[in-house]
Amino acid sequence: MAKKTLDRLDMKGKRVLLRVDFNVPLDDDLAITDDRRIRMALPTIRCATDAGARVILMSHLGRPNGKVDPKLSLKPATVRLGQLLECDIGFTPDCVGPEAEKAAADLADGQMLLLENLRFHGGEEKNGRDFAQALRNLADLYVNDAFGTAHRKHASTYGVPSLMPQGTRAMGFLIERELRFLGSALENAKHPFVAVLGGVKVSDKIGVIENLLGRVDRLLIGGAMAYVFMAARGENTGKSKVEREAEKHGKKRDIIAEAARLLKTIETSAAEVCFPVDHLTGKEFSTDTETDIQGPEMEDNWIGLDIGPETTELYREKLADAETVIWNGPMGVFEMTPFAGGTREICEVLARVAKQGTVVVGGGDTAAAVEKFGLAEQMTHISTGGGASLEFIEGKPFETIELIDDV
Ligand code: AMP
């Protein structure tokens, strides 16, 4: 069932609690180094203010773990938003309590304010009922436009909308766009459908691979993720980074054993799964280290830092006729120029694929890589949510989105 976007709410004169993602990077002087997240929220904010809503913006910033941390204040975001919208924006130094209540009550139609960092209260991440109720009391309507936290049941994403009646809850345009692109890439994918997975954390992506195996025609694996599968096969990975263990909810996970089980599933799956046939290795984890091309196994004391040239060629072929591609995770340590080649080549192929087909890029580092190579504009869609996009691809339902009213 399609979910309601905010333009379907009658917002005139109403106080609208709008959950945005202003989790922007700050430097030591608390200056915003990248304001993309704020700019991306503007269409939703403008839609509300143009409709005469009294907008109460709320967001988290960083991980203050329930304590006030002046370095993680949203004040700089308020200033930046004011510059972008060329208007005054109110700010309350606590997101709940008498001052926030008064500021919300005093708003005129079309005015807005930003509440201080939600995570200064432990109740945000714990989805505390009292905290959610205090936020809920600030407003008549609720809009969620923070895709990056949509997979988390926090007070601002889950508690608040649970306390609000039917007919008052909508999503913003950013979430709507994410659901549309990620959803249609998965559900209505044109074939050949190829997934490219890399990066360093396999624990995050085991469920993703399992879900994708039944959907894609080809799955290309790169990055340090590939070394976990090599280790599971008993192959030499030298001194490479291999995620052997992970912890979730206090429970230890044996990632090598999980990868070994996944390899069995892969054997019987209809999808063609490709692993690197060679690697660009280095003696040290540094830019000016001695390098070598090795494969399929690595030699003792060498570190795998990128896919090798044969692998790059193979993956280029496997992507050439793709109609739909999902890409999450770089092919190597793209942050270091000598090891950026594999990721850049894949990125360039995908820019060509996106001319006729659909290419959806997810994950913070992958988005940063695409940005770095100047190819972001060429992709069909770059997801704003790293963990959220992975959980979506994994097929996990988002309870926060289920709470939004149906159209
Ligand atoms: P993830 O968060 O799992 O998507 O991982 C992204 C990170 O993986 C990037 O910062 C890359 O530098 C890193 N990465 C990719 N390949 C390798 C590798 N072979 N060795 C170490 N780190 C890698």
Image: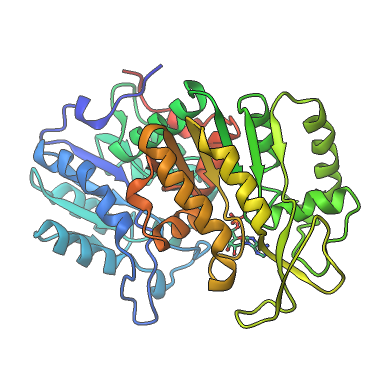
Q: x, y (%) of residue 74?
A: 32, 64
Quarter occupied by residue 262? top right
Is residue 335 toward the left or the right of residue 301 in the image? left
In this view of the protein, which residue sits in the foreground, 330 or 339? 339
Front one among 121 and 313: 313
So how many labels did they put on this image? 0
Quadrant containing ligand 1 reads: bottom right
Along the horizontal axis of the image, is 260 left or right of 97?
Answer: right
Percent of width and height locating residue 61: 41, 61
Q: How is the image coloured?
A: rainbow
Rendered residue at 85%/33% (across/down): 264
Q: Residue furthest right?
A: 234
The quarter of the displayed image where residue 68 is located: bottom left
* Residue depicted at x 69% and y 28%: 271
The percent coordinates of residue 94 (x first, y second) are 33, 61
- In this orientation, which residue lies closer to the viewer: 235 or 363? 235
Q: What percent of the width, then of the height, locates residue 224? A: 70, 58
Residue 163 visible in image: no
Instruction: Examine the rendered structure and indicate whether residue 303 appears above or below residue 104.
Output: below
Residue depicted at 91% across the width and 52% down the height: 234
Camera sees residue 179: yes
Q: Write the residue at 24% across / 34% down.
A: 140
Q: Is residue 255 above or below residue 29?
A: above
Where's the N terminus, which quadrant? top left
Screen quadrant of the C terminus? top left
